[in-house]
Image (cartoon, rainbow, N blue to C red):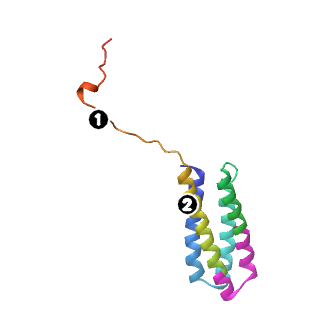
């Protein structure tokens, strides 16, 4: 498996957790979850940022910016503002991760194996040596 796929899938799982967390927890718990989530976004995007194509590199840059924003918003906002900004950040991460997975799948080369059925007359004969 390629690093792009693994990092995007991990970021999508983080996004799913953060979406649920933004609606379940409040206060300091939500603040620290999103501070850690923002750091995870930055690390996940940086994990494969060097070897990526231009499209993947652009997505990595957006995810890094989103991760930095998530850390900042975790400490700037409080109460319902924190809840909904956190929810929006987690949804944005889910969208960017999904786009990254789709781009990866569209650009991955696949080997196609094909079985051809031929009649007896069309088969090449093997020579005994």
Residue bearing mark 1: 117
Instruction: Give the residue furthest to the bottom.
Output: 79
Instruction: Identify the residue at image location x=60%, y=53%.
Output: 4
The quarter of the image holding the C terminus is top left
The majority secondary structure of the magenta stretch comes to helix
Residue bearing mark 2: 9
Residue 35 sits above or below residue 83 on the image: above
Residue 124 on image: x %, y %: 31, 22
Q: Image quadrant of residue 45?
A: bottom right
- The Cα atoms of the two marked residues, 2 and 1, are separated by 39 Å
How many other residues sit within 10 Å of disc 2, few (<14), some (14-19) or many (≥20)?
some
Residue 26 on image: x %, y %: 63, 85
Q: Secondary structure at mark 1?
A: loop
How many other residues sit within 10 Å of disc 1, few (<14), some (14-19) or many (≥20)?
few
Residue 117 sits above or below residue 81 on the image: above
In the picture, measured across the screen, residue 102 lies left or right of residue 86, that is: left
Between discs 2 and 1, the one toward the N terminus: 2
Instruction: Identify the residue at image location x=71%, y=60%.
Output: 61
Residue 67 on image: x %, y %: 70, 68
Residue 106 sits above or below residue 88 on the image: above
Residue 129 sits above or below residue 99 on the image: above
In the image, the segment drawn in magenta is 67-84
Instruction: Identify the residue at image location x=68%, y=55%.
Output: 57
């Amino acid at each position: 498996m390629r690093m792009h796929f693994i990092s995007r899938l991990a970021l999508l799982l983080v996004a799913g957790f953060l979406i649920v967390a933004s609606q379940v927890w409040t206060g300091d718990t939500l603040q620290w979850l999103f501070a850690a989530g923002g750091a995870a976004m930055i690390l996940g995007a940086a994990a494969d940022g060097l070897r990526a194509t231009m499209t993947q590199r652009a997505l990595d840059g957006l995810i890094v910016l989103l991760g930095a924003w998530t850390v900042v918003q975790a400490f700037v906002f409080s109460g319902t503002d924190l809840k909904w900004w956190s929810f929006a950040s987690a949804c944005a991460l889910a969208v960017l991760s999904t786009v990254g997975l789709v781009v990866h799948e569209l650009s991955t080369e696949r080997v196609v194996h094909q079985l051809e059925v031929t009649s007896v007359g069309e088969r090449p004969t093997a020579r005994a040596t």
